[in-house]
Image (tube, helix red, strand yellow):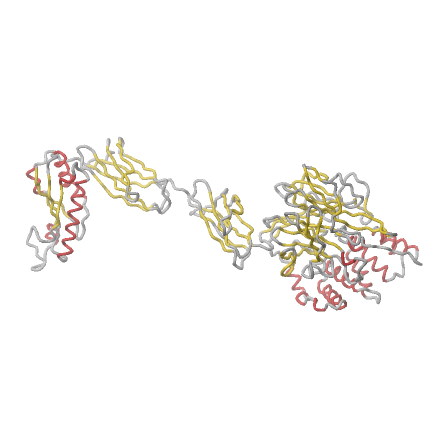
Amino acid sequence: MKSLITIFLIIIFSNFIYSQQSWNEKMGDHYFASYSFKEAVVKYEFIKEKTTRVNRNLAESYFCLGSYEKSEQYYSLVVNSKEHTDLDLYKYSSVLAINKKYTKAEEWRNKYYVAINQADNITHNSKNTVFYKSLQKNKYEIKIENLDINSKHTDFGVVYFGEEIIYTSSDNGALKKNWKWNNLPYLNLYSASLDNNMQIVNREPFLEFFKAKYHKGPLTINEAGDFMVFTVNSNKKVGKEKLYKLDLYYSTKKNEKWSKPRIASVSSHKYSSAQASLSLDGNMMFFAADIRNDKTKKKDKSKSNIDLYVAFRKGKAKWTKPVNLGEKVNTNGKELFPFYHPDGFLFFASDGKPGLGGLDVFVIKIKDGMPIGEAENLGAPINSNFDDFSFILNKEQKSGFFSSNRPDGKGDDDIYKFTMKKPFAKKIISGIAKDNKNNMLANTEVSIYDDNEQLLKTVVTNETGEYSFSVNKDRSYKLLGNKEKYYEDKNIVNTNVPDDIIISNLVLNLIPNFSLLCIVKEKTDGSFAENIKITLIDNIAKQNDDTLILTSGKYIKSLSNNKLNNNINYNIRVEKEGYITQEINYKQVLNENKQYIVEIEIYKHEVGIDLAKMENISIYFDYEKFDIRQEAEKELGKIVLLMNNNLTMKIELSSHTDCRGSMEYNSRLSDQRAKASADYIKKRITKPERIYGKGYGSKKPVNDCDCNVAPCTETEFQENRRTEFNIINK
């Protein structure tokens, strides 16, 4: 970055003294001191015998202008001279990394650590290109894109502001006053909207009533949108010195109006402070400052003196004393542009930690305002061998913005949008909503709950049924899927697993249009029976569901209250005057979304049954069974007709078995046959108590079949497996 980053290195108590120098050197120093680097380079290059100081200024000027090869050339001269400083070693290693000379960059970075007696900081894992190759892998599956809003000027510092964003730009349009450093207009703040493609549109000046003489921005704002802190560049006289420095200003919003900005208590005339990032509630603030360069302390020329600090808000405007974030974050290089994410992570830019060159973006966990664990380099494509900074991430850890001066941009510093599939510091629960036939279900509501059953978020699946949630590690969550005309589905997901992306699909079964079609036909010709009384009894619910008259021989019963694979169990009774009453038991597993069909045949009573023949009626059973066979229904129908026509008739029935089996078994089986026979008739006559029966086992055979004497034929066995009827009262 060629704007607000290197300003920290130069706009800090600069006081250049002109001595017995050549005119070109004197003018070069003048332009260098006023940040007119193009003019400084022209004057310095005219000097034939350059001193180490001139070479250093040339290296710095070319660096600020983005001419990194020329900067490397002059830093090489500086570090190989006897007058080099420890900081020269560090800067030379930095520009080597920018130029992708990683092995050489690490060699000089290690020389720097040795020079400042911090040899233990030598990063052995980065002594070869394997480390740098790992940083170039897109491990978070990030896609970046340059924004249309970017200009040929400087654009950076996006922050979320409700449904809008605020960003910093030197594309000031009508303003003609330029900054001598890069001949670009001064920085200002703008509010804008985001379209569906995350493009910044409809920008307008923000905080326009507060006029800053020089730079204004970047800005940070709390979630409520009523408290903000922003950076202002000014020049002030302290004694005889004119100080160019950065300060943090704050403003509060009341009745839709922002108050006049005032300098924040964390700022001081002794140091520069800038680039603040507030927590959502606005009570914790991270910012960059060069507090170690306080003139009351010994100046350490081996360090850049730009660190990150944290302070806590007391009351409306007061802040605690800034606390340095320590060695987990800060280095002997520059740490800038902090961004505090509400999930408890701090993103920041640094050129003091091993990276791809220039400023790289890092992330570290924050607890109670201080870092824990180790900082992680985000790697490519967020980071490059140029300056990458001003990183911001949305709450869901799915998209955001950062800025870079990489050469494929449109101007000095550009804003890039990004989307990502893997979280930086969280887990992703991802899945597809589908039905039991593997069809993807778009527009399905998927909600996620924590382990206290508190709703965290609800999303709607896209056209391919996909959904995802960014969640914390080592937690348990519940997913609940809902869609009209489908049964809901839920999953329990545990994030205490090594995978960053946890797949948890939801299967929502279509609420089926189950129904039961009862068809009643005449047995004689197969035609639909008319004027039939049908009764359905639900044996599971133990209730009479329906009794009605069918005029067409068809009846459709809705089963919409059932789910897939439910069981149904109905007794279906069909009655018509002059016909034998039919009753069947229908059981079915609803394993398909369809209409189930049951057909029942009815036939007429035989007219003129002779009571004398009644004694000869018998029905027969299968071996070891007591079910009423179909051919037996006709005989039983005769008895039903007689009893309904003779209301005083009483009948005793007797049931029998063949000789196979034990006496106890045969007695029990004959009782079951008697009961089945009597029950069939009872359901079809008035005053059902008029019929009763008893089982006699194998005691009363109708033939000479005796299992203890001689083998019997199957016909003889069948003749004995019977129920007989005896009229007790006519």
Residue at image coords 81%, 59%? 296
Residue extending furthest front?
Answer: 315
Counting from the top left corner in percent of width and height, residue 104 is at: 73, 65
The quadrant of the picture occupied by the C terminus is: top left
Residue 458 horizontal side relative to residue 687, left or right? right
For the residue pair 38 and 367, the one nearer the viewer reads as 367
On the image, the x and y values in percent for residue 79 come to 80, 64
Can residue 198 be seen here? The reply is: yes
- Residue 580 shown left or right of residue 241 in the figure: left
**As displayed, is residue 93 above or below residue 217?**
below
Res. 256 image quadrant: top right
Q: Indicate the quadrant where residue 138 lies.
A: bottom right
2 with respect to 562 (left or right): right
Q: Nearest the camera: 679 or 84? A: 679
> Of residues 106 and 484, which is closer to you in this image?
484
Q: Which residue is depicted at the point 8% across and 52% down?
A: 701
Pick out the residue farthest to the right: 20
Is residue 38 in view from this perspective? no
Q: Is residue 422 above or below residue 175?
A: below
**x%, y% of residue 565?**
36, 47
